[in-house]
Image (tube, helix red, strand yellow):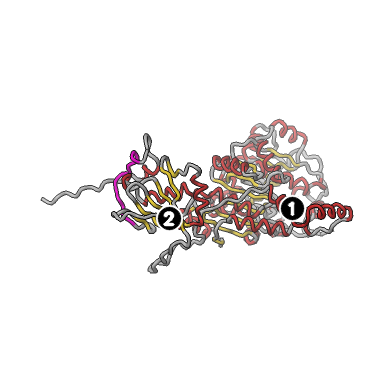
């Protein structure tokens, strides 16, 4: 049996039964002799083992030198958590930790049947775990007797204040006996937390551990710049590239969560959603699906994901950039736990590079800037996983040999290998083709240095677009139209030659298949603007037409004549983009 110095014997046995061989830094810190029966203000990140830490720390206070609890007249300890999921998770942790002491742990959380909670409290509970609002309701209705409390724990106090629970917390703490022990745990200690501690703790011992810093050393941070239109495709490729046991995708809004959940479900991913509009039952089922392996991707908002813990979480994807460095660290800190490695991927929109750099700098994180995984990257990683499949290294059993010989004789080794590869790849979603974006944070030549001019394409193809100078077409609005509708980047587009009734556009031959797939069989860019593939290089009229090589050329000015291009009724997006203010006439001198 492993001996844990300073831990109550019954809890030490529970730790051994659970497979513990060593304690985390915050757990060791909470067993320090100077903390015996003292109040404490503790900095501890989610996933640092703080539930076991405060469970061990308050045990001597609750048991008072006894080995087991007797039936209580009223609760001895109260643990307050910001969310239902975290409160129920804490309850489960304390149940196994206190199993050999005969402790009964009750929960009081919003969204659950209050009558069931009241009956549990009436039967007698040694430890009560709950959320601020529901605990206040029970106190007000006199179903929760606070008179016998010896210890109060505030778990993730900073989140409770962020969620607006200050008034409820103050009501609960003022309802508790003055002669109590108060343990306050918070990921950060801003002024609001320091004031709360000063008001409701007595000579609190400040405990700060290196666990948070050590935890983030186990996380690999990656920043992936992507065009805004390619965000979801990039996330699909990231999920396919890592094939994580559990992945958590953070979005800014409920609408984005719902949209991505539907999109990824259609792509064959096993996905669940967590957002504020879900009932408690739906949230519980979603988290259980992640824990038992029925789902592997959870898409959530920050508020909905507060306090949840997914064992084995290997990948965190920030579909929308966090609003501050604390949120970045809190999101990412759900992976890379208990000595396991994790990956945190930031999807950086083209106009969000500087914001991402500031965010990473403020969080003191060094991220690797890279391109999102391409189709080739994903398929190569699939092949690597296939080659390392344990089935390929498992010894052949005697009872299998006869049938294997029959298979080899009938189909041959090459055909059997091909069938194995096809079966392996069959259930996986195809990766997406992505537009090319420079990977690093440097976006041009240093100041004072001339940018290197891009050379022409090794091979190119030409297309005719059905608008020209007669319709007031211009490269400056044709270019974004081509990029958007044709899934191209500016680097894929070469010369743009304006003619009277049409425009010739040169494309890199490597993106030709992607362009054709994007514009579809109707070969339409926008409304009635169509494209036609040309055989070879077209002949250009030398009548002062516009040209772009790239962005070079004459600007014709004026409004595009969409009626001549076949438009009727409402103008297209290109027409809106082309509105141009007429320059004000300068007054003539008198």
Question: Disc count in the image?
Answer: 2
Q: Which mark sits nearer the N-terminus, 1 or 2? A: 1
Foreground pick, 277 / 529: 529
Q: Is residue 80 visible?
A: no
Tag 2 secondary structure:
strand
Dominant SS of magenta comes to loop
> Residue sitting at 68 percent across and 33 percent down?
142
CA–CA distance in space, label 1 to label 2:
43 Å
Q: In the rendered view, does 258 fall on the left or right side of 100?
A: left
Q: Is residue 183 visible?
A: yes
Residue 529 sits above or below residue 385 on the image: above
Q: Residue 69, percent across and down?
A: 81, 44
Q: Residue furthest bottom?
A: 449
Q: Give the quarter of the image for residue 261.
A: top right
Q: Give the quarter of the image for residue 147.
A: top right
Q: Is residue 562 magenta?
A: yes
> Residue sitting at 82 percent across and 59 percent down?
2
Mark number displayed over residue 420: 1
From the image, tell me which residue sits under label 2. 506
Q: Which residue range is magenta in the image? A: 553-564
Foreground pick, 565 / 330: 565
Tag 2: Cα neighbours inside 10 Å, few (<14), some, or many (≥20)?
many
Q: Residue 38, percent across and down?
A: 68, 54
Foreground pick, 257 / 436: 436
Tag 1: Cα neighbours inside 10 Å, few (<14), some, or many (≥20)?
few
Q: Residue 481, percent across and down?
A: 42, 48
């Amino acid at each position: 049996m492993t001996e844990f110095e300073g831990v109550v014997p019954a809890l030490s046995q529970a730790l051994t039964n659970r497979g513990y061989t060593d304690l985390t830094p915050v757990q060791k810190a909470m067993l320090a002799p100077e903390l015996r029966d003292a109040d404490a203000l503790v900095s501890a990140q989610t996933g640092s083992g703080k539930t076991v830490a405060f469970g061990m720390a308050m045990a001597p206070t609750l048991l008072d030198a006894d080995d087991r609890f007797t039936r209580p007249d009223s609760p001895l300890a109260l643990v307050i958590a910001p969310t239902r999921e975290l409160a129920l998770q804490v309850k489960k942790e304390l149940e196994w930790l206190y199993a050999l002491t005969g402790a009964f742990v009750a929960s009081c959380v919003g969204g659950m049947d209050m009558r069931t909670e009241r009956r549990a409290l009436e039967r007698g509970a040694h430890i009560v775990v709950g959320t601020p609002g529901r605990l206040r309701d029970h106190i007000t209705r006199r179903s929760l007797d606070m008179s016998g409390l010896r210890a109060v724990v505030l778990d993730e106090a900073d989140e409770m204040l962020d969620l607006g629970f200050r008034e409820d917390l103050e009501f609960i703490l003022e309802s508790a006996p003055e002669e109590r022990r108060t343990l306050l745990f918070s990921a950060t200690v801003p002024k609001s937390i320091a004031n709360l501690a000063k008001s409701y703790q007595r000579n609190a011992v400040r405990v700060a551990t290196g666990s948070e810093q050590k935890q983030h050393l186990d996380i690999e941070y990656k920043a992936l710049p992507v065009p805004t239109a390619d965000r979801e495709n990039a996330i699909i490729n990231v999920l396919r590239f890592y094939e994580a046991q559990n992945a958590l995708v953070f979005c800014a809004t409920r609408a984005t969560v719902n949209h991505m959940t539907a999109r990824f479900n259609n792509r064959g991913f096993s996905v669940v959603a967590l957002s504020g509009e879900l009932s408690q039952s739906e949230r519980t089922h979603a988290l259980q699906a992640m824990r038992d392996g029925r789902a592997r991707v959870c898409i959530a908002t920050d508020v909905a994901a507060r306090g949840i813990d997914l064992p084995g979480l290997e990948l965190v994807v920030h579909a929308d950039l966090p609003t501050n460095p604390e949120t970045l660290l809190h999101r990412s800190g759900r992976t890379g736990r208990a000595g396991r490695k994790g990956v945190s991927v930031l999807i950086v929109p083209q106009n969000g590079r500087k914001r991402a750099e500031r965010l990473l700098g403020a969080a003191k994180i060094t991220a690797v800037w890279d391109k999102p995984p391409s189709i080739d990257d994903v398929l190569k990683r699939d092949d690597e996983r296939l080659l390392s499949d344990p089935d390929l290294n498992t010894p052949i059993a005697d009872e299998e040999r006869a049938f294997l010989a029959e298979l080899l004789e009938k189909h041959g080794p090459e055909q059997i290998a091909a069938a194995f590869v096809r079966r392996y790849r069959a259930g996986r979603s195809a990766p997406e083709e992505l537009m090319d974006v420079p990977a690093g944070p440097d976006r041009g030549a240093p100041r004072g240095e001339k940018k290197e001019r891009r050379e022409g394409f090794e091979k190119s193809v030409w297309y005719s677009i059905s608008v020209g100078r007669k319709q007031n077409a211009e490269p400056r609005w044709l270019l974004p139209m081509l990029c958007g509708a044709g899934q191209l980047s500016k680097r894929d587009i070469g010369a743009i030659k304006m003619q009277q009734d049409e425009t010739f556009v040169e494309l890199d031959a490597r993106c030709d298949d992607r362009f054709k797939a994007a514009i579809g069989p109707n070969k339409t860019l926008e409304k009635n603007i169509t494209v036609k593939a040309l055989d070879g290089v077209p002949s250009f009229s030398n009548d002062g037409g516009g040209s772009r090589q790239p962005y070079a050329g004459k600007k014709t000015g004026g409004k595009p004549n969409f009626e001549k291009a076949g438009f009727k009724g409402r103008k297209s997006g290109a027409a809106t983009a082309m509105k141009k203010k007429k320059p004000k006439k300068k007054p003539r001198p008198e």
